[in-house]
Image: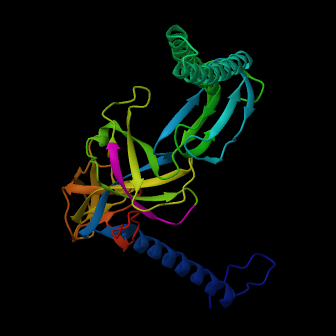
Amino acid sequence: MQTRPAKAGSIARPVPHTKRRVLLVGVLLAAAIALLAGWLALQPAEVAAQTLAARPVEIALSVVGRVQPQNTLDVRSQNAGKVVRLLHDEGDVVARGSNLAVISSDVEAAEANGARSREQAARAEVVRTEQILMRTETLAAKGFASRAALDNARAAKKSAGAMLAAATSEHRAASARLSEFTVNAPMAGIVLLRPVDAGQVITPATMLFQLGSVDAREINAEVDEAYADDLRPGMKVRAAASGSNVIFAAHITEISPRVDLSTGGRSIKLVPNADMPLPPGRTVDVTIVIAVRDNALLVPRGAIIDAGKDPRIYVVNANGRVDERQVKLDPWPSLDAIIADGAGPGDVIVLTPALTHVSARVRARETSSLTSDPED
């Protein structure tokens, strides 16, 4: 047993066994921790990865459209005046030729009434001259009327007929003029807009109603000019009204050749393949299918390094090391990047390149993080 030197006037005491054991355990534990830390430092870091596999994918363009009637027409009055009555409101369905509004026309109404009175007077004069001619012809046959009297009676009847024709034409013109102050629907449709109220004074430039066709709907959208050249009339479209899970088929009918200078886009028109209850103005999510590629290589765009200038990816090689690979990307704006060159099926792509570096030893943890649905 070890002993400590005894001080003068004191008795030497032995070191307890428990204290030595505690010291030994502490040293061994510290050594184990150091060994474990060193071992862990030598272990490869785990990274999220994905093994490239060829799969079918749609080359599609997603835009937002808005429902419009296939035909719209602004209705105006031919004459200025005060709006007396508005016979329909927004949302009403009207037949072609039905009355929409009445404009004040006191002067025209008075002229029409005067023309009608003159026509009635001319008609009465025709009846009177016909009766005179009949009596004159009877008297002339019996020798009681001269030839001159008979000629005068015939001339009076002819003159009365001409006056009636003139009065009738005048009345017809006045009535037509008066009818212009009653605004009629030029086509069957639904009232989309009624921007005026009764009592308002309008001019021929004032829009009274806007009508939209009810038998058909079209969807108007705008596509960036960079992608509009790839579109063609007849292309298939999937669409869904905003907030709805009901997907319906449609197709492109028209692509405007003009580029909107303020937006850099070209307008397109689409028509549903079947009748859909879509109210005008409803927002519609549109997916235009450009093409289908059977063997596309997709990776999340977050796995691409410097995608805008010099796109590269990190690949885990057979030795568990990270290699850098330059790739070429398809320029189409899909949700996931499409690798056109530089990688192939079976390559293990690092999905989080910012968390590792070239030549690092890693352990790939397979993760599926594609946002594109291959079945779409």
Q: Is residue 306 visible?
A: no
- From the viewer's perspective, is 339 left or right of 279? left
Q: Quadrant of residue 264?
A: top left
Q: What residue is drawn where x is 70% and y is 17%?
A: 114
Residue 322 image position (x, y, % from top left):
28, 61
The C terminus, quarter of image: bottom left
- Main secondary-structure element of the magenta-colored stretch: strand
**Image height check: is 304 above or below 98?**
below
Q: Nearer the viewer, residue 175 or 298?
A: 175
Please give the range of residues in magenta. 244-254
- From the viewer's perspective, is 256 left or right of 100? left
Asked whether 251 falls inside the magenta stretch, the response is yes
Asked whether 268 falls inside the magenta stretch, the response is no
Q: Which of 297 and 167 is in front in this view?
A: 167
Residue 308 image position (x, y, % from top left):
32, 42
**Image height check: is 187 above or below 127?**
below
Residue 332 image position (x, y, % from top left):
29, 49
